[in-house]
């Protein structure tokens, strides 16, 4: 088991990213595939098909519901890709390493992903943000002769520690509130009339994103205690 990147409270549930339905954290992990590009009948059939390029810039978003290309039911049947139910955590293993998305609709991916189905004790959104926090660690362990790649055997050794579902929900509530504030400047930027005002808002937006990025590891390592009564429920 690899040493954890985040040191978490001792009473959190511990395991690895290896599928173990009995533990309740990860039920399954699958990769994806690409139907033959020489068969027109395999493509443009309405089944969303995700590529790493499409999630490489999702710093401010996590859910995906549409893709640049779609495949047909026949194309899905003729390759090793699977149709993943909504709520699957999709992690890029190469080009780039460590980008994360959660599908909002049933979706397939190409072979550049590892797709995680969470167990009963782990919220998919929690795992997605946990992977984002751990991205520096993922990039460090990625290897390959041509380009960096996360190999499944290495990734499954990663140790993950998670709190109770109630605490996960509180952390995600807190996270969503921070995310909302960090993104609040985007619509404001579109409403100003003077260029210098737009620059000031852009600078403020970046400061808020920097604050969000510093808070994330504190939330997912338990250093911010979301059970503290001083932190109110947000929904």
Image (cartoon, rainbow, N blue to C red):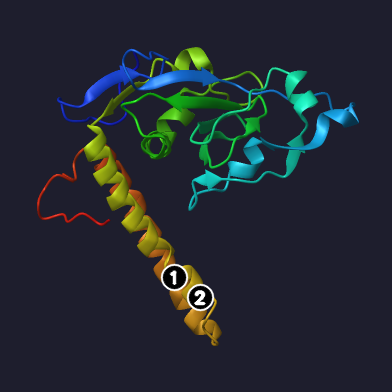
Residue nearest the observer in this picture, 84 or 5? 84
Q: Left or right: where does residue 69 sit relative to residue 181? A: right
48 on left or right of 142: right
Say left or right for 50 vs 177: right
Residue 193 appears anywhere in the view: yes
Residue 98, label in figure: none
* Residue 221 appears in the rendering: no
Q: Characterize the local packing of mark 1: few (<14), some (14-19) or many (20 or more) Cα atoms within 10 angstroms.
A: some
Residue 33 coordinates in the image, percent (x, y): 69, 23
Q: Residues within 10 Å of mark 2 (few under 14, many from 20)?
A: some
Which element type, helix, strand or loop, lies under badge 2? Answer: helix
Tell me the quadrant of the picture where the C terminus can be found: bottom left
- Give residue 106's position: percent from left, percent from top: 60, 35
Marks 1 and 2, Cα distance to the nearest angstrom? 6 Å
Mark carried by residue 189 = 2
In what element is the residue under mark 1? Answer: helix
How many labels, in total?
Answer: 2
Residue at the left extreme of this rendering: 229
* Position of 104 relative to 231 (above/below): above
Q: Is residue 48 left or right of residue 19?
A: right
Name the residue furthest bottom.
193
Residue depicted at 60% across the width and 19% down the height? 144
Residue at the image position 60 percent from the left and 45 percent from the top: 65
Residue 217 at x, y percent in the picture = 30, 42
Quarter of the rendering containing residue 208? bottom left
Residue 76 vs 230, above or below: the answer is: above
User: Who's the residue at 43% across and 63% down the image?
Assistant: 183
Image quadrant for the N terminus?
A: top left
The residue singled out by tag 1 in the image is 185
Measuring from the top left, give residue 93's x and y in whole percent. 56, 27
Residue at (43% x, 19% y) in the render? 27
Marks 1 & 2, CB-CB < 8 Å contact: yes
């Amino acid at each position: 088991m690899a040493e954890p990147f985040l040191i978490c409270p001792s009473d959190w549930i511990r395991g690895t990213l290896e599928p173990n339905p009995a533990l309740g954290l990860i039920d399954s992990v699958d990769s994806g595939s690409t139907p033959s590009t020489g068969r027109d009948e395999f493509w443009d059939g309405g089944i969303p098909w995700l590529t790493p390029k499409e999630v490489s810039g999702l710093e401010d978003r996590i859910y995906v519901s549409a893709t640049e290309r779609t495949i047909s039911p026949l194309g899905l049947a003729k390759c090793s890709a699977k149709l993943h139910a909504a709520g699957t955590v999709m992690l890029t293993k190469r080009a780039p390493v460590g980008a994360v998305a959660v599908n909002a609709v049933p979706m397939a991916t190409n072979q550049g992903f590892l797709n995680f189905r969470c167990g009963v004790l782990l919220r998919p959104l929690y795992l997605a943000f946990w992977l984002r926090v751990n991205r520096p660690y993922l990039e460090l362990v990625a290897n390959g002769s041509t380009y960096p790649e996360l190999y499944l055997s290495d990734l499954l050794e990663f140790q993950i520690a998670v709190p109770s579902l109630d605490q996960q929900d509180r952390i995600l509530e807190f996270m969503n509130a921070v995310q909302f504030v960090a993104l609040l400047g985007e619509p404001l930027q579109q409403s100003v009339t003077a260029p210098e005002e737009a620059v000031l808002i852009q600078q403020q937006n970046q400061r808020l994103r920097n604050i969000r990025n510093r808070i994330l590891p504190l939330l997912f390592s338990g250093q911010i205690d979301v059970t503290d009564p001083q932190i109110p429920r947000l929904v």
